[in-house]
Image: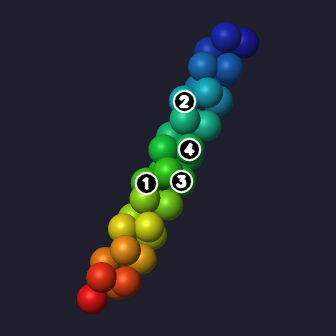
Amino acid sequence: MLNILATVIQITQYIFMMFVVKINSIAFFANALRLK
């Protein structure tokens, strides 16, 4: 039971990190385009 919970938490953290990275890269590209 504890193992399943830990796995779910790890997956959630991984998805959250990917989401944050995606938003950061979108913001970075938006800034780069605006500066051109």
Q: Earlier in the sequence, mark 1 or mark 2?
A: 2
**Horizontal arrangement in the rendering, residue 12 relative to residue 22 (left or right):** right
Q: Secondary structure at mark 1?
A: helix
Gap between marks 1 and 3, in whole Å?
5 Å
Kindly check if marks 1 and 4 are in contact, taking CB atoms under 8 A apart as contact. Answer: no
Q: Which mark is residue 10?
A: 2
Q: Secondary structure at mark 4?
A: helix
- The residue carrying mark 4 is 16
Q: Is residue 29 above or below residue 18?
A: below
Q: Earlier in the sequence, mark 1 or mark 4?
A: 4
| Residue 33 occupies quadrant | bottom left
What is the three-letter code of the residue carrying label 1?
A: Val
Q: Which mark is residue 29?
A: none
Location of the C terminus (image quadrant): bottom left
Q: Which tag is nearer the camera, tag 3 or tag 2? A: 3
- The residue carrying mark 3 is 19
Kindly check if marks 3 and 4 are in contact, taking CB atoms under 8 A apart as contact. Answer: yes
Task: Say which of 3 and 12 sits in front.
Answer: 12
Place of residue 4 in the rendered image (x, y in percent of width and height, measured from the top left): 66, 21
Task: Say which of 34 and 23 sits in front.
Answer: 34
Outermost residue, front direction? 35
**Horizontal arrangement in the rendering, residue 19 relative to residue 34 (left or right):** right
Q: Is residue 7 above or below residue 34?
A: above
What is the three-letter code of the residue carrying label 4?
A: Phe
- The residue carrying mark 1 is 21
